[in-house]
Image (cartoon, helix red, strand yellow):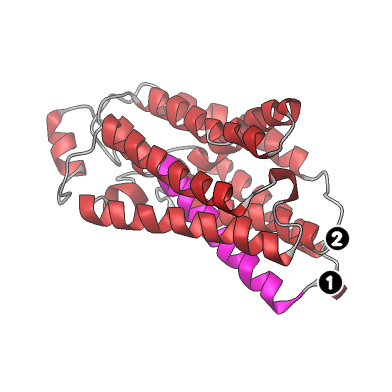
Amino acid sequence: MAGSTNDSLSASIEGVKVKPSIAIGISLYLGYLAVVFTLWTINGVEYTKIGETLESTRLHYAYPTLAGSLFLLVAITVLGWWRPVFFDRQKSGPGWAWILPVAMLGFVVFGFMSMQADNLTTQLVLWSTLGALGVGFGEEVATRGTLLVGFRNSLSEGKVWLWTTLLFSALHAPNVIFGMPLTFMLVQLLFTFIMGSALYVVRRISGTLILPVLLHGLWDSSVFLPRATGAEPGSLSAIVYVIAIVCAVAVIRRNWHIGATGSAGQGAA
């Protein structure tokens, strides 16, 4: 059942130290990006080569995302936003949409199976895992976490999905500054918008941000880690993107007209 009253607002933000707002959500989003891109600049990142070596995995993948995640950890603790960032009050979406996280997990398994085991080292696995934790937690909390919580205070759920997903896609635009060709970056923006919608779907059907965090981290690691071992990228992800579009349409349509509740967690049943 959807809610759009002040009562639902009061219930949904109970216990927070600072009332959610769009301004705070955007500030934390920009703060996360500032941390990551500052470290990229200091470390001399070349985006197209991130994760190709142990040093790049450590300096360009793990360190920046973990530092950004630490910034967000402190912020949501100070704000008292842990519950609304990580948990919706209700789940929403058709049961068959669970095919999406299953398909994503299948891609992850396929990616890891493509690794060249002879080139796999303990340190490479360690730093790739830490990088996966950093990017999964950092990007999800910055967009489908604090940004979503802030936007839900003033916008309907359809607009919350749209703006948070656009901003998730936009956080990849600066990659062009770090060596990604412009045409590749434009294509990446499209695919990250689709993937952002997919991860929004996973949050809505599971009722928690924890699953998107894990899937996002595993997805990235299943791309970077095999590449670092010399494996060629696969094409199975194309299937996942098609499934993502179908599931996103179904879930977003169901949630589109939910009113602004300030919820950090109010949704349709």
The amino acid at mark 1 is Asn
Seen at 39% across and 28% down, the residue is: 160
| Disc 2: which residue | 230
Q: Is residue 35 left or right of residue 131?
A: left
What residue sits 37% from the left and 54% below the top?
71
Q: Nearer the viewer, residue 51 or 98?
A: 51
* Magenta-colored stretch includes residue 16: no
- The stretch in magenta equals 121-143
Q: In this view, does 9 lie above or below 56?
A: above
Q: Position of residue 127 (x, y in %)?
A: 62, 68
Which quadrant holds residue 204?
Answer: top left
Of labels 2 and 1, earlier in sequence is 1
Residue type highlighted by circle 2: Gly
Residue under label 1, please give it.
119
Residue plotted at (54% across, 53% down):
135
Secondary structure at numbered mark 1: helix
Q: Quadrant of the C terminus?
A: top left
Magenta stretch, overall SS: helix
Q: Residue furthest bottom?
A: 122
Callout 2–callout 1 Cβ contact below 8 Å:
yes
The answer to whether residue 137 is magenta is yes
